[in-house]
Amino acid sequence: MSSLPRPFTQVPLRRDQLERGLPSLSNEEVPAVPIVMVAADPSELEARYGLHFDDTFDNLDYVKVAVVQLNSGARLTLLVHRGNPVPSVELCAVDASSVSVQGASLLARSLNVSPIWHVPEYAH
């Protein structure tokens, strides 16, 4: 696990939340708007940063999910779909605003992972 200060803390999800699945949770509890997809493996992120990914499901597939809160207060979801043919983690926010894009970019940099897709730049 990294000993450097991190710009985030993990937000634990309750067992009942996981059993009901992501579709039953609000976007504020578990942000669901994809912002950045990064080349990463959840087990590596768990080992390097002490994150814990929980198993649950969404409208598409079974998933592994972790929710973090940035020091700024913004929440982001790290999401891995089991059936995704490309090993990657989606970083999701509550919306695609410039603030959310900046938060997801900060998280990707702090996890030292490379973006392989990102939402088109936010237009005012």
Image (cartoon, grey):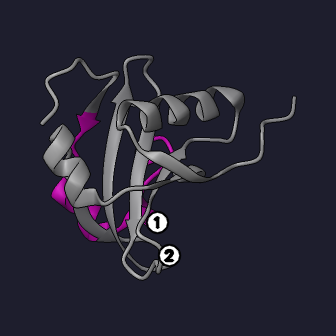
In the picture, measured across the screen, residue 45 lies left or right of residue 86, that is left
**Res 13 seen here:** no
User: Is residue 74 inside the magenta stretch?
Assistant: no
Mark in the foreground, 2 or 1: 2
Q: Amino acid at mark 1?
A: Pro
> Residue 6: x, y in percent?
28, 23
Q: Quadrant of the C terminus?
A: top right
In the picture, measured across the screen, residue 98 lies left or right of residue 110, that is right
Residue 88: name its quadrant.
Answer: bottom left
Q: Earlier in the sequence, mark 2 or mark 1?
A: 1
On residue 59, the disc is 2
On residue 23, the disc is 1
Q: Which residue is located at x 42 percent, y 47 percent?
A: 77
In the picture, measured across the screen, residue 33 lies left or right of residue 43, that is right
**In the rendered structure, are the residues bearing label 2 and label 1 in contact, judged by CB atoms less than 8 Å apart?**
yes
Q: Is residue 11 above or below residue 38?
A: above
Q: Which residue is located at x 38 percent, y 30 percent?
A: 110
> Residue 35: x, y in percent?
60, 47
Q: Amino acid at mark 2?
A: Asn
On residue 34, the disc is none
- SS for dot 1: helix
Q: Nearer the viewer, residue 104 or 23?
A: 104
In the picture, measured across the screen, residue 108 lies left or right of residue 94, that is left
